[in-house]
Amino acid sequence: MKYLVMVALVASASTFARTTGNLLLQGEVAQKLSLSIDPQSNQNIDIENGETSLLVAKVEETSNELAGYKIKISSLNGGELQNADDATKKTSYQVSYDGGQLVTPPKSGSAEVKDSGVLGGLVSYTSDVNIDVAALPNAAAGVYSDTVTFTIEAN
């Protein structure tokens, strides 16, 4: 008798089984956010006469962030090309990124030079980096330099 009651309970439970079910299918795409700097061959900057819109690099930007990305710059010497033997001998310069306005790269913090805006998916874009350099007609002999740092970050 006990056996019959147990079979009846199992049989009645199966009559209340669901008729639909859900299966979650998903995949994940990793963030792609990078930049690559390609210095141009005309790296010999005319310190004595100055420069206007001298192309010094091309930067390839890659991102798949839907909110877009920003490019920021800073510089070791705060926008000054300094003589390697005497840092008091210097001239100033400004950077134009991707045809934007001229900006003096700061020594501390950073200056935003590009905001991509909203993206539809993966993009790869190349931006020109041009500089204007103030003339230093009585420049002392030596190498004048600065190091510019480019940063890409998601919006």
Image (cartoon, rainbow, N blue to C red):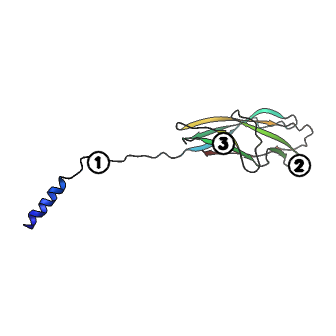
**Percent position of residue 58, x then y:** 68, 36
Disc 1 marks a residue whose amino acid type is Gly
Q: Quadrant of residue 145?
A: top right
Residue 127: quarter of image: top right
Identify the secondary structure beneath mark 1. loop
Closer to the observer: label 1 or label 3? 1
Looking at the image, residue 123 sits to the left or right of residue 84; the answer is left
Residue depicted at 63% across the width and 35% down the height: 126
- Residue 35 falls left or right of residue 15: right
Q: Where is residue 34 drawn, in percent x and y?
A: 60, 44
Badge 3: how crowded within 10 Å, few (<14), some, or many (20+)? some
Seen as rendered, the residue at the extreme right is: 138
What residue is drawn where x is 58% and y is 36%?
Answer: 124
- Give the CA distance from mark 1 to mark 3: 47 Å
Image quadrant containing the C terminus: top right
Q: Which mark is residue 21?
A: 1
Location of residue 152 in the rendering, given as x and y in whole percent from the top left corner: 63, 44
Disc 2 target residue: 88
**1 or 2: mark nearer the eye:** 1
| Residue that label 3 marks | 71
Please identify the residue farthest to the left as the structure is shown.
1
Estimate the spatial distance between the alpha carbons at disc 1 and disc 2, rounded to whole Å: 75 Å
Q: Amino acid at mark 2?
A: Thr
The amino acid pointed to by label 3 is: Ile
Marks 1 and 3, the one that precedes in the sequence: 1
